[in-house]
Each structure stands twice: as C-alpha cells, then as structure tokens.
Amino acid sequence: MEAAATQSSLSSVRADPSTLYPSLDWSRSIIVLGIESTAHTFGVGIASSRKPYILANVRRSYQPLKGGIHPREAASHHVSVSAQVLAEALEKAGVGISEINAIAVALGPGLGPALRVGATIARGLAAYYRKPLVAVNHALAHIEVARFYAGFEDPLVLYVSGGNTMVTAYARGRYRVFGETLDIALGNLLDTFAREVGLAPPYVKEGLHAVDHCALRAREPLLLPYTVKGMDVSYSGLLTAALRAWHRVRGMERHSVCLGLREVAYGAAVEVAERGLMHTRKNALLLTGGVAASPVLQEKAGIMAKLHDRRFAAPPPELAGDNGAMIAWLGLLNYLAGLVVEPEEAVVRQRWRLDMVEAPWR
C-alpha cells in the first residue's frame, strides 16, 4: 500500500538561485517545511536557502487494491502516515521544528478530502508553533522545482501528470497556458487503461509505467486515433479505441495495443510542446510532472528539442512525481517574496489553476 520513502538532494545543481530569482533576498538563511497531499501521495519536504537546498524529501503513497484513487481512502491513508513522514523528514534534515522558519502546504489543485488532510496539519503546525503559513499551488511547485533543478531561466514547460497535461510558459507575472488536454490527462489515460485491461494496478518500475512494460514485447504499434487540436490534446477517444482493440485481439497483438497507445499519447504531447516552442521562441524545453519520469517520454521530448537546437531537461524521478520537496521549495520562494497567509485563510481550492497564480519572484 505504500511506496518507499525517498530523499533527494539538489547538490548537483549548478544554478545559483540568486540568478534564477534575482528579486529575492538570498542573504538570509531560511528553512521551510512543505506538505504535499493533493492526491495519492503524502509527502513532507524541507528546503533551505543554502546548499544542498533540499534537506529532506520523504513520502508515502496510497495505492488502491482495486479501481482508481478513492478520495476518502486516500485521505485516511494520509492521516495514518502523516506523523511518521513528518518525523522522518525532520530527522533526515537534521533540524528541529524550532529551526523551521515557515510551513508551506499545497492547497490545490487536487482531491478535496486528501487536500484537507495536508491543510489541517499545516494549519495546526503553524498555529501551535507560531510559524508563518505559506499557501502553494501544486502545479506551480512541479514547475519551479524542475526549473531550479535544470537551471533554466525561461523555458517552455510540458507538464504531464495524472491530473494535468499542459504546455505553459511564464509571461507578464504568471505562467500562461498555451495548450492543455481537452478531457483526461496523460497520466490518467495510462492508469485507466492499465486498470481496465488488468495489466496491474498502475505502477512505475524504473521509470516505466505498466503500459510501457507491456509495450516492450510488441513487434509493431497498433494504429490508434491521434487527436491534436491546435495546441490542445484529447485522450478520451484514444482510451476508448485502445480498450476496444484490447478486447478484440489476443496474445502478442495486445502488446501492439500498448505500444500504439503509448506512441500516440506521448507523440501528441511532444507535438503540442513543439508547437509551443515555435510559438514562444523559448530556448529550452522543461518536462515535469509524474509522467516526466518516463525515460521513453524524456527521449522523445529530448530528440524534438535537439532538432530545433533547444536545450532540454527533466527532473529526477523523486522530484518528478508528487513530493513534499517541491512544496517546500515553492514555499521558500513565496516566503521570501512575503506571500504568507493566516491559518484561517488557508482553505483548499480543488480547481486552483496554474494560470490563476501570481509569480512575483520571477
């Protein structure tokens, strides 16, 4: 039911945060604790304004035995592991709660019951220990931790996860969405297909999804519908066609269904990212979100970027999927920018879109 705890360090990062975030005061030594609970993962990360920047990144993930994520079951899981994850993060970071300067929490977008667990814990910690509370947008956290890891000043971002698929870039005070999914997200497409055909509960091993593992044995991909509308993608028709094809064929042909699904899904995402690069004329492509851990998708996006003489990067797996470190890092940026809220104002926002959030530290 739980994924192993992970710890990540950004010690290999060559970027100077004062270069990427010149408007912030990096002379102060600040430590921020971040809480992530938007979906299946409960994570606690601790970020510092001093190297190695990420002091701890501990998480536990809820995996349903059958079907997709059940919001209330996910919330119950988060409650059951929260104390252990928090204690382990503080221990790994080698700091006490008294040394924490602020508490950050992801307040959306996400599943309501799961979000409320993190919000309740964060409000309690902030009130009891008299710490400033920082509200964090989950999507923006994915982008900023990846951008810092890559050292990219102004990239185009392909953000792909279980609940989000979008092409975005910074312009005039916030990230603007140039294209997105018109129905289901890329991660949701892969997970739903894997569950429906009985491949396995959706899992990732060595960066490869269950669908990727199925596709490894295919001789050639099955032709499936490919839907790109300008800068937007649509995956619901692809899912329906792939499910019908799976039940229509037998044996090795089913591996061809997996390969066809993967190639169409990843290809569509890379195509809209390519259009975004041409439109915005950005000099770098940044891949982030849970699906960004896929080496197959990384290879496709990297090849496309190289063809256009653009730089490319993706964060390591422990920073690609949902994690507390990204919440702590964005919490640190927001705190340095003076963006704090009172505990009673820290309410969850299930549909808190990326393009609704100001980024004053850019």
Image: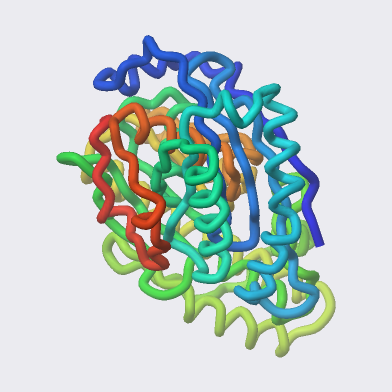
Splitting the image into 4 quarters, where does residue 144 fall?
A: top left
Residue that lies at the very extreme toward the top in this rendered image: 27
Splitting the image into 4 quarters, where does residue 134 fall?
A: top left
| Coordinates of residue 157 in the picture (x, y in percent) | 38, 43
| Residue 288 appears in the rendering | no
Give the camera-side residue of 187 and 35: 35
Give the camera-side residue of 42 and 141: 42
Q: Is residue 46 above or below residue 259?
A: above
Residue at image coords 35%, 35%: 334
| Residue 325 appears in the rendering | yes
Residue 245 vs residue 137: left or right?
A: right
Give the camera-side residue of 117 and 220: 117
Q: Is residue 242 above or below residue 157?
A: below
| Coordinates of residue 117 in the picture (x, y in percent) | 58, 61
Residue at image coords 34%, 27%: 336
| Coordinates of residue 203 in the picture (x, y in percent) | 74, 60
Give the camera-side residue of 345 and 197: 345
Q: Is residue 64 above or below residue 81?
A: below
Residue that lies at the very extreme toward the left in this rendered image: 172
Splitting the image into 4 quarters, where does residue 330 fall?
A: top left
Q: Quadrant of the C terminus?
A: top left
Residue 358 vs residue 205: left or right?
A: left
Q: Quadrant of the N terminus?
A: bottom right
Residue at image coords 27%, 39%: 359
Residue 26 vs residue 320: left or right?
A: left
| Coordinates of residue 280 in the picture (x, y in percent) | 22, 41
